[in-house]
Image: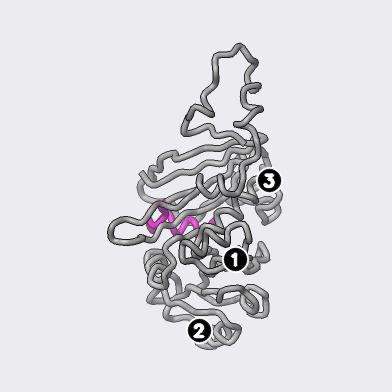
Amino acid sequence: MRRLFPVTDETAVPDSGERPGEEDRGAAGREWSLAELAAAYAYPAAGPGGPLPWLRANMVSTLDGAAQHDGRSQPISSATDMRIFGTLRALADVVVVGAQTVRQEGYRPARARAEFAEQREAAGQGPAPAIAVVSASLDLDFSLPLFTSPLVPTLILTGASAAPDRVAAAEKAGARVVTAGDGIGVDPARAVQALAGLGHTRLLTEGGPRLLGQLVAAGVLDELCLTVSPMLTAGDAQRIAGGPAVTVPQRFRLVSMLEEDGFLYTRYGRS
């Protein structure tokens, strides 16, 4: 892997007369350690008033804009993309995910990573991030390991008008139901504040596209980690964010860009 942005002494191309690409096969092209990836994707440091909630998204997209192939993201991903996926999870307090993605991707509880145990303990985090499922209907299979055997209890973000029998079923399975909306659905801003109120300030969302679209529309997304996959799929697959368009496009700034085997690992922050 090599860093393309920001440009440093390591990424600057020397005037050596080598053919393009040869200078990148040394240190800049080696496999990065998990510690280096963690440093590259570290959350912002807490300010004088303490940590503020910071919501980042991690998504993958093909060159023609598809976020999935045959309903799943795995076919357009890579081994390095999955290493970054695991690193982002290891840095987070909680992973926020939509109910449809839980059903489609077969979500399981986040696992403890021995490589990050010391770092998480020093940061005051539990052994693994909690999973927070956003669901208005609570139409979920509560017999799945995500609810019955997580290292830390799974959270369910829902509205105040959620069906009482489904709330009871979720709590019986061991999940913690968090109200983040006055009606049936979830208000994204209230969801972020509710999670922060539970001590979860390092937030990560993995979508899906509908949830990410809602977060974008609500203006609560602080950062997007986007893997650009060098693949074309055509078809009618969803983009990384769906739903109604925002009134005015939101401008984000490029924070960093890594490359390996044609995959671009970009990181954009709120301008």
Q: Which numbered marker is on residue 163?
A: 2
Q: Nearer the viewer, residue 80 or 185?
A: 80
User: Badges 1 and 2: C-beta atoms under 8 Å apart?
Assistant: no
Q: Is residue 17 above or below residue 240?
A: above
Image quadrant in which the C terminus is located: top left
Residue 11, given in percent of the width and then of the height, sits at: 53, 28
Q: For the residues marked 3 and 1, what is the alpha-carbon distance in whole angstroms? A: 23 Å
Residue 204, given in percent of the width and then of the height, sits at: 50, 59
Q: Quadrant of residue 27?
A: top right
Identified at 64% across, 23% down, the residue is 21
Identified at 50% across, 48% down, the residue is 41
Residue 67, given in percent of the width and then of the height, sits at: 60, 49
In this view of the protein, can residue 148 be seen by the observer? yes
Q: For the residues marked 2 and 3, what is the alpha-carbon distance in whole angstroms? A: 40 Å
Q: Closer to the N terminus: mark 1 or mark 2? A: 1
Image quadrant in which the N terminus is located: top right
The magenta segment is: 207-222
**In terms of secondary structure, where does tag 2 sit?**
loop
Decide: few, some or many residues near mark 2? Use Cα within 10 Å; few <14, some 14-19, many ≥20.
Answer: few
Decide: few, some or many residues near mark 1? Use Cα within 10 Å; few <14, some 14-19, many ≥20.
Answer: some
Identified at 60% across, 73% down, the residue is 151
Q: Which numbered marker is on residue 100?
A: 1
Q: Which numbered marker is on residue 76?
A: none
Amino acid on which the number 3 mark rests in the picture? Ser
Q: For the residues marked 1 and 2, what is the alpha-carbon distance in whole angstroms? A: 18 Å
Q: Which numbered marker is on residue 78?
A: 3
26 falls in the magenta region:
no
Amino acid on which the number 2 mark rests in the picture? Ala
